[in-house]
Amino acid sequence: MTYADVSVIVDGALDESETFFDYLVMGDYLESIQSEAKSHGYPTSVFVLYHEHEETDEGCDCIQYLQDHHPWWTNESEDQ
C-alpha cells in the first residue's frame, strides 16, 4: 500500500473521509470508528480503497478497477 482512502458512511450519508499513508495510524482510526459505531447504533459502513501508486493532484482511476464494492466493515446485518 502506498496510501489508502477510508470513507465512513453513517445512516446512508458520507460522515468522514480520510487518507492514510501509514498502516498503524489507519488501524487505530478503523478501531475507533468501529468502537464508536457499536456505541451509537446507527447503520455504519467503512470502505477502504488501497492505492499502489504515489498520490497525485489529478486523482486516479483506482476505484474503477474494484471487483467487489462491499464495505471493509459494517454493523448492518446481511439480511436487512
Image (tube, rainbow, N blue to C red):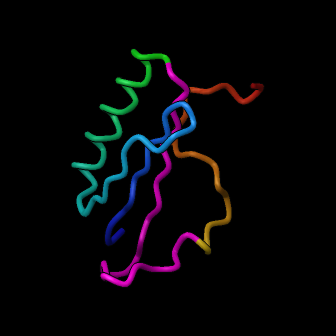
Instruction: Indicate the quadrant where residue 40 lies.
Output: top left
User: Residue drawn 28% across and 41% down?
Assistant: 29
Residue at the limit of the structure toward the right, as seen here: 79
- Say which of 23 and 71 sits in front: 71
Magenta part of the chain:
42-63
User: Residue drawn 72% across and 30% down?
Assistant: 78
Query: Residue 33, percent across and down?
Result: 36, 33
- Say which of 15 and 5 sits in front: 15
- Say which of 3 and 13 sits in front: 13
Q: Is residue 52 magenta?
A: yes
The image shows a total of numbered marks equal to 0
Instruction: Indicate the quadrant where residue 58 lies.
Output: bottom left
Compared to residue 77, the image places residue 55 above or below, namely: below
Q: Is residue 55 magenta?
A: yes
User: Residue drawn 67% across and 58% down?
Assistant: 68
Identify the image quadrant of the N terminus.
Answer: bottom left
Query: Residue 36, percent across and down?
Result: 35, 24
Identify the image quadrant of the C terminus.
Answer: top right
- Residue 72 is left or right of residue 20, and the answer is right
